Amino acid sequence: MREELAQKLLESDHKDGDRLPSIRDLAKAYGVSPNTIQATLKILESGTKIRCIQGKGSFWTSNGLLPIIDPPQPRESASEKLNRLFKEDWERGILKTDEALPLMKELAQRYNISQTLIRKFLSTLVRQGILIRSGRQFFFTPKKQVAEQTPLSELLFVTRCNSWGGFTAESEREMDFIRMVYKKAGASHYKLSLLGINEKNGKLIDRSGKTCKLSEFKNAVGAILSTMLVNDPQHLLQIFAGVKFPVAVWWEHPEQNLPPRFFNKPNWAFFNSTFGSIPGQEMGKQLQLNGITQIAYFSPYHNSSWSVDRLIGLKNSGLKVKEYTDSEFASPWDFKQIARKKVEKLSVEAYAREILKKKIILLTNKNKDYEQLPIVCVNDEVASVLLELADEKRLNISKQIYGFDNSAESYLLRLPSYDFNTQALVDHMFFSIENTDTVLQKKMQQILGQVVEK
């Protein structure tokens, strides 16, 4: 299908320099998924038929002989630089929602901006209601009175569950998210009611297995929804469609799959930390600061948008990338599903890991360039398997390996890995519930992470 789509696009009326329609428009026009369109564009780009430019789109070229030259970027003013850096520190969680901002002198040094401009910038945020001032210090505006903390102030916290309300975390990040939500709710004196969404019957279930209705929670002042491993998140959102209180959604799906009708609701906010090309770009920037210009990228989960996006981000950062990818599977969950059909419950993890090892060895049969290159893996699990195969003398690896997830295993292995900043995700979700009208809060907020060296 990808090859056929690539040929159809080549046969369409175009000339050098023309921009292709967006991925969403192409997916709609050809009746396929955005992932299929991304893979099709990758085919055209590898054949130097198009050039993809981050933030601008994809453009036709003549076999790469007439490359598109990016127009010169306008010079960034000091005010624009300050606004950008302040926003990035906010998205990274460096600026805490419940702590004083650094002093103006410290901010001036951090951003290399004059204190006069810093003072003017912070004063503007005060007038906009984002900050308040107390003496020399600035704070984010405290929570609204509607969320005043009493024993009756209740937050609904919804994750996936099975038919009787049970829940099993499938990743450290998912478990960390739940733990941090409970900790934050406790520190803010909320009553947290944990509910599950069961996709087979489409109902909300409490942890005792009882089916619930939203009308039962009279004192609810907000809701936190997790869409991680929820196959049909739109149904979960629909349950909360008519609520008046604020709703914060951890959107663990491609952004283009978000239903517009919920995105445009004034009391809703969505948060993303793992999808899109930004994690790959952030990883690429850090590697280049370390003097790395070329890498090998390993992913046995390349039938997923998150794997494709991380590869795109690495390339957009300026790195040269040798690809070792396989598009048969979309996530570690697929390997576990195969294992569950083959072996007893206690052996599932080991069996799934052995399948993964075989898949990675097949990827290395493409060529041996990876032996002399730093390696970036789509997640820490793949990175740890590569290290294990190297210890078993089944692969020859001489350079540093990097991963995504910053898992506990990455610390045991001293594996540098990208942290998706779950703490900032939780802090910002609570902030959005308590401050629905702040102009600082976007409808889809990207949480920025960082590479953690061990």
Image (tube, helix red, strand yellow):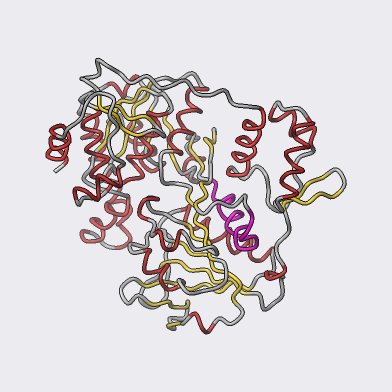
83 in relation to 148, above or below = above
Q: Does 381 sit left or right of 179 as displayed?
A: left
Q: Does 44 sit left or right of 84 as displayed?
A: left
Q: Quadrant of residue 233?
A: bottom left
Rendering coords of residue 271 (x, y %): 50, 53
Highlighted range, magenta:
421-438
Rendering coords of residue 188 (x, y %): 69, 65
259 in relation to 43, above or below = below
117 in relation to 164, above or below = above
Rendering coords of residue 410 (x, y %): 48, 40
Residue at image coords 42%, 83%: 211
Q: Does the magenta stretch include residue 431?
A: yes
41 in relation to 203, above or below = above
Residue at image coords 31%, 38%: 299
Q: How many marks?
A: 0
Residue at image coords 50%, 23%: 73
Residue at image coords 24%, 39%: 39
Q: Quadrant of residue 306?
A: top left
Q: Is residue 275 magenta?
A: no
